[in-house]
Amino acid sequence: MIEAMGMTKDTVLEQISLLQVGTIPVRLNRPCTVNDGIKVLTEKEQEECIRAYDEAGRPGRVMKFVPASGAASRMFQDWCLAFQEGGFRSRKKAVEFAEDLKKFAFFKDLQSLLHKNGLDFDRLVEEGRYVEILAHILTDKGLNYASLPKALLKFHAYGDESRTVLEEHIVEAVLYTRDSHDNCRMHVTVSPEHEGLVRAHLSGVLPAYEARYGVRLMVEVSVQQASTNTITVDLDNRPVRDRKGNLVFRPGGHGALLHNLYATDGDVIMIKNIDNVVPDRLKEEMVHHKKILGGYLVSTQKKTFQYIEALSVAGAGRVIASAERFLSDTFHASPPAGYSVRTERGKIDYLLGRLNRPVRVCGMVRNEGEPGGGPFWVDEENGSQTIQIVEQAQVNTDSEEQRSIWQSSTHFNPVDIACGIGDHRTRKFDLKRFVDEKAYIISRKMQNGIEIKTLELPGLWNGSMARWNTVFIEVPVETFNPVKTVYDLLRKQHGPS
């Protein structure tokens, strides 16, 4: 079984060892704030970024990357509970459920399915047959929404038309990846069990969007490799087995998608979560800030490459001070202990190693209480400090000091990232070289009535990118519109104008 997944026994034993050690907390120094780790661009700088982005987009350098493996089951937890219990726990909740349903983009699909089965929505409500309505939403008796990937749910309605989340991302790809030949590039990662459904959906909708916008949509689909799965253990660190006696493995979290990111054909890659989409009336501002992030990336890469070239030829000593300032001002990179007494050659080698890395420009929104990670200054083992995206599970909240720093965060990570994975010679970096292998996370879950421990690989935008050259830029909170529960779709930003 281990070999069939593309893994080795040594890999599994190493995973068990990590599960025994537990999560290794990062050492927070302070939160990143405006002008202390987070940049706020002037209007002129924003305009320059947009021009740089548009210039990079014309030859087809831009690709949209969407981690879309998330299942929709969590969105419908309350409804699933009501379905399992045979109804809502109060009449008030039942009435509100029926009233709210008419506001969702998938309501017309629900009505059609009910009608096909000889049922009428209003009659079912009058008779209190809410479980039957839920069955037509959640199970394969109807829409099957509790089992679909989030990518295939209808989020927004436009008159008689409604769009899935994946279709909204397709429209976004048209708006900010279109090149001079009208090609638009997008890469979607999905769970293996959903690959067929997603590919079928794309086959059905892509021709219509190509005709509507006059483009060629080049949409790639990939799955998380089985070799990135991780073993589960019980609380005594013994491997868990299923009823057939097989070892139990689970997906290794979004950090496992680093290989998928590397395998894309993109040069400037724009990452965004699957559920963070808005209807057309709000897309203009979203596209504006996407281009700002991408343009800042392109401009920063260009300057970085110039310094690398200057440091790689005779007489490089004359640019050492300038390169040091660039690293500090742009990437907030501080040299390690002992740097000041290095020889000129030693300083050049350090600067080249520090500059010659993948680059990411991350949008950060003001913290309004959303759960998730944020930007922090982190103390490194070599005595330097770096700016990092940190998840709460990485923090030692038993420490009053660390807990206080975590709680004082002013900004939140919405996963709005522009990535440059090529070097100054247009070769792809080996992205595995820049992972903080200690940034794994141990979680506890219940399975078949027993408590188990699971291992998440270093996350895609925290541990897996920890050694990238990083820039944080403040973006408006209006660019962050996640949908974690179905009722988030009733927020004004997801409704019609």
Image (tube, rainbow, N blue to C red):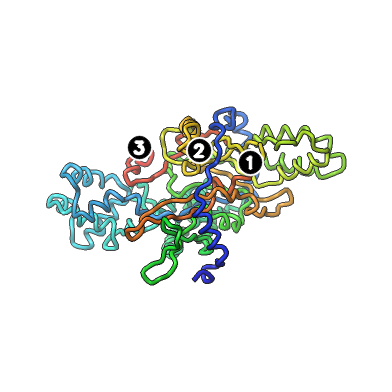
- At x 55%, y 43%, the residue is 417
Mark 1 vs mark 2, CA separation in Å? 21 Å
Q: Secondary structure at mark 1?
A: loop
N-term mark: 3 or 2:
2
Which numbered dot is residue 492?
Answer: 3
Residue pointed to by mark 2: 374
Whole-angstrom CA distance, mark 3 to mark 2, is: 25 Å
Up/down of 346 relative to 441, above or below: above
Q: The residue under label 3 is which amino acid type?
A: Lys
Q: Position of residue 296 (x, y in %)?
A: 62, 38
The circle on residue 345 is none
Residue that appears at 73% across and 43% down: 305
Mark 1–mark 3 contact, CB under 8 Å? no
Q: Are marks 1 and 2 in contact (CB under 8 Å)?
A: no
According to the picture, the residue beneath numbered tag 1 turns out to be 381
Amino acid of disc 1: Glu
Q: Residue at x 68, y 46 (%)?
A: 357
Return the residue nearer the eye: 259 or 444: 444
